[in-house]
Image (tube, coloured by chain):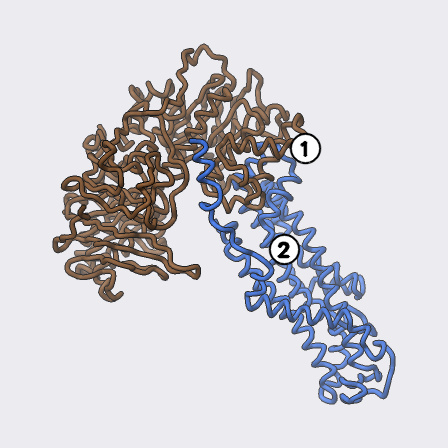
Chain colours: A brown, B blue
Amino acid sequence: MTTTQTTRQDGDLAAEGLSVGYRARTGLTQVLADVSVQLHSGRILGLAGESGSGKSTLALSLLGYRVSGQEILAGRVAFDGRDLDRASIKELRKVWGARLAYLPQDTATSLNPALTIRRHFVEGLRRHRGLDNAAALARSAEWLARVEIPEPENALHKYPHQFSGGQQQRIALALALSVDPEVLILDEPTTGLDVVTQAHVNRLIVTLARDAGIAALYVSHNLALLATVCDELAIMYAGQIVEQGVASAVYAAPRHPYTAALIGAVPTIASDRPLHGIPGIPRPSVPVHTCGFAERCKFRTDACDTDIPLVTLAEDRAARCVRLAELPAFDPGADHAPATVVDRAAPAKELDAILTVDNVGVVFARPGSGEPFVAVDDVSVRVPAGRALGIAGESGSGKSTLLRSIAGLVRPSSGTISYRGAALAGTAGERPVALRRAIQIVFQNPDATLNPRHTVYQSLERPLKLFRPDIAKRGRREAVAAMMRQVRLAPDLVDRYPRNLSGGQRQRVAIARALLAEPEVLLCDEVTSALDVSVQASILELLVGLQAERDLTVVFVTHDLGVLRAVADEAIILQNGAIREEGPTTRLLREPSHPYTKELIAAVPDPERANEFLSGGS
Amino acid sequence: MSADVLNTVTAADVSVPRQRSLRGFLAIPQGGFGVGLLLLLLVLVVIGPFIAPDSPNEISDQPILGPSAQHWLGTDSYGRDILSRVLHGGASVILLPLVAVSAAMVVATLVGLVSGYLGGKVDSVVTWAINIALAIPSYLAVLVVVAAFGGGGAVVVTAVAVVYAPYITRVIRSATQAIAPREFVLAARARGETLGWILFREITPNIGPTLLVEIALRFTYAIMFIASLSFLGLGVQPPSANWGVMVAQNRALLLVSPVGVLVPALLIGVLAIAVNLIADALTQFFGDRIHERLMV
């Protein structure tokens, strides 16, 4: 058994057997163990893993960046013949920004709101490239043009807030690349952006990095994206690299059960493959004498309880699993478990509509300016009983506002929303209790969806008290426990406060809170967008299962077309508050007719159409 | 699979709740020191009247005696035992501000919650009223009220409560505005909860830390404010034993017998410092939580 090669070319950045820990009062927690990665010029290495897997620690360690309490336990970070892990801050300042560039997720941290774009560029170019003002300005404008910022000369004199989020990230990219770095570290650079913007930024990153011969590391939780934009992939789990290889090969035929599970959890728009969550949550520290993934693995045996080396399978391919020899390569396309998606024979048109939205418009007054903001523009939808309707669109498309007006949180400015043929009052407070019970809503943000000062039981008891007079006070605790089991929550969490629950658990509580009212219609507002991919898959699995089981009608708002495909029978595509296209989800995604739908679909990263994605999708 | 989930999401994977106990609060230097000082003063104020050698207004000896074995702090210009007056004079110094701040707090919390949550016209009117109230200098306002209605505890307490209420309202209002758009509040609205439930059960617990810090801070100000008013002869009226009144009455003898001024003045100072330290420690104690709730 050999571990990965440790030879190194000059100019490339490499971690060699790197182990890192954080020291706190409670002791030392190891977060990286024996990690070896190499970045090669002109190539992009993708680093994937759930939150807490150690990928950001690795990214920062590669830069020689040390946070307080962090200790290098073994190994080194080699760059151009020196050890970055031991370099002094003076040495590091010479390479940071000049030869090693870093692009973080949030431009709020990379661009200074008080400085013009010009100042951002000129500082780096003068310091690291010794250019004079005029040369620096010319170069800045040139780079802004390369990242497709309109009127680059003009843009130099503006402040960051005068650009959109996608433009800011492109400016930050131009800023990082303008000094001709050899290495670029990207930490979730497009996570906060809209789908179409994401695709645009990613295209630029790949093209520019390849053209400039930069060695890049791309950190992301989105495996499909990484497989599309990267040359190689490394999968991290619990501080170890569990699989490594050429991106397309790893994605098509994973060898480690974790890689397979992770791919299985990513919603795609291309296939009918049902999603499968990974049970449990990632362990926070490096495993000792066992496989880190063992406790969540379907293939675990007693042989897993040992130190497992990263085994080289072929040139450019390695995996860390005891059962590599026995287990064949996984086929993420195949599915062993029965599909949870229920086949629905009756066409939607023939079903009774439980919810009808007729010519609904929502207009917000904009303070200061006279022009009001039209959030929802004359939208009409029928939601057939027992079906799942998906509403997709980018941020600002009005999808959440539409959902909130159905929930009675936003009063429509025009039009009517009817439930079983009877018009609903504009706000929830004006609706009779039976209607408030029948329509329940689940929100996006797991940090805010539950009152931090109420225990799980207090949150779950409330709908029972309001909507279920049939359940006596004594029976409530039992009803709550039963519902918690249904949403796959251990009932002994009932007296916890939300801060002591994980994000996925909080969303399950929020779903339980809605279901305890015994609703007919469940409104879901981006309920999984803040969760890890593996947790998202299990929540979606749960929702799809519950929907079939309880014959619920679900209205699901999402920006992710893969998620849309996984949950919705019918879908509408919203843009600027208006419906652009509607129809059965599968047909809509396979044969889109509206240009906007086509644009959205082209923006979804798909490893099988990588070239198409990178060339612009059209 | 479901069994797996149930087994794997129980205890070990969840972060241990951070202990926020009284001990944790006392471990903050300002907290421990402040609480210690305050307790000492409270003991003095509560058992003082019982251990005082004389009753506060009893003329027990010759006037203007220096400290001696019989009169530890000497006597004042009427021949009253200063120590006895100090031991009796603390209650009103603590009680009046406490009542004033509590009254202001109740009104301000109600108005702040309603205005912050409902927004719109209600909020505009409240904000307008607050801005006007804040433009009037506090001392001037209270002086005018006292001039009109006469001095004395009840008038001063009411005046101070009225003067402080807008400040507190403003803090509560902005804290409420930060919580109101949160999804758990939206969820409550969608359930059709009553205004009372949303304000007091959903929002109030989440602005608790802000409320507590504000109470402690306002209490400090009120102590100083009312003691100053008593010194000016507008608050507690002579011959009542009150530290503020004592400073005023004995200041004529400052050069002859300074303890009569220094001791009550010092006690007022220590009381204000103790409460201020507690307010400071509360800010630290809830600090991250206040940030988490309000700044995001």
Give how far across and how far down residue A141 sits, in percent: 21, 49
Q: CA distance from mark 2 to mark 1?
A: 39 Å
Residue flagged by tag 2: what amino acid is it? Ile
Q: Could you tell me which quadrant the C terminus of chain A lies in?
A: top left
Rendered residue at 49%/24% (across/down): A360
* Foreground tag (2 vs 1): 1
Q: Residues within 10 Å of mark 2 (few under 14, many from 20)?
A: many
Q: Which residue is mark 1?
A: A473
From the viewer's side, name the closer residue of A565 and A505: A505
Rendered residue at 78%/71% (across/down): B47
Q: Which mark is residue B168?
A: 2
From the viewer's side, name the closer residue of A294 and B273: A294
- SS state under label 1: helix
Residue flagged by tag 1: what amino acid is it? Lys
Q: Chain of mark 2?
A: B
Give how far across and how far down residue A575 sits, in percent: 38, 28
Give how far across and how far down residue B4 sits, in percent: 43, 35
Left or right side of A311 for A470: right
The residue at the far left in this view is: A9
Is residue A32 visible to the viewer in this orientation of the structure? yes
- SS state under label 2: helix
From the viewer's side, name the closer residue of B38 and A283: A283
From the viewer's perspective, is residue B122 above or below residue B18? above
Q: Chain of mark 1?
A: A
Would you say the residues marked 2 and 1 are in contact, meaning their CB atoms lie under 8 Å apart?
Answer: no
Give how far across and how far down residue B269 sits, in percent: 66, 73
Left or right side of B116 for A289: left
